[in-house]
Image (cartoon, helix red, strand yellow):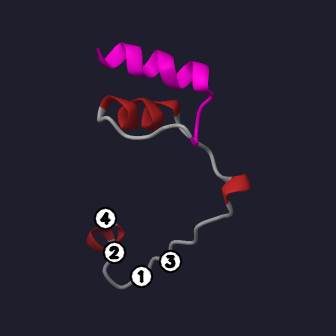
Amino acid sequence: MNRKLEPDIETIFMMPRETYTFLSSKLVKEIAQLGGDVSAFVSPHVERALADCRK
């Protein structure tokens, strides 16, 4: 998108360490709805609740 807005300006994307990142609950819900593994992001209780919502 940046290139479309201003083709002469280069954009650099720098990823921070995981400890400095924000995790959106919307993203976790989407992963769960698509059948993905969310165990690295939520507690086992929340993982079961998300799985129950898919049924």
Three-letter residue code for mark 3: Ile
For label 1, the crowd category at 10 Å Cα-Cα, with few meaning under 14, some 14 to 19 and many 20 or more, is: few
Q: Earlier in the sequence, mark 1 or mark 4?
A: 4
**CA separation in Å, label 1 and label 2:** 6 Å
Comparing labels 2 and 3, the label whose residue is closer to the camera:
3
Q: Position of residue 18 (x, y in %)?
A: 66, 56
Q: Bounds of the magenta span? A: 40-55
Q: Secondary structure at mark 4?
A: loop
Secondary structure type for disc 2: loop
User: What numbered label is drawn on residue 9?
Assistant: 1
Neighbourhood count class around disc 2 (C-alpha, 10 Å): few under 14, some 14–19, many 20 upward: few
3D distance between C-alphas at marks 2 and 3 = 14 Å
Q: Earlier in the sequence, mark 4 or mark 3?
A: 4
Which mark is in front, 3 or 1? 3
Q: Which residue is mark 4?
A: 1
Amino acid at pointer 4: Met
The stretch drawn in magenta includes residue 48:
yes
Above or below, 29 against 14 in this view is above
The C terminus sits in image quarter: top left
Q: Is label 1 in contact with label 2 (beta carbons under 8 Å)? A: yes
Judge whether residue 39 is colored magenta.
Answer: no
**Disc 4 and disc 3: Cα gap in Å?**
13 Å
Check disc 2 and report the residue beneath it: 6
Q: Quadrant of the N terminus?
A: bottom left
Find the distance from the CA under tag 3 to the CA under tag 1.
10 Å
| Res. 3 image quadrant | bottom left
Residue on which disc 3 sits: 12
- Residue in the picture at 58% in, 67% down: 15
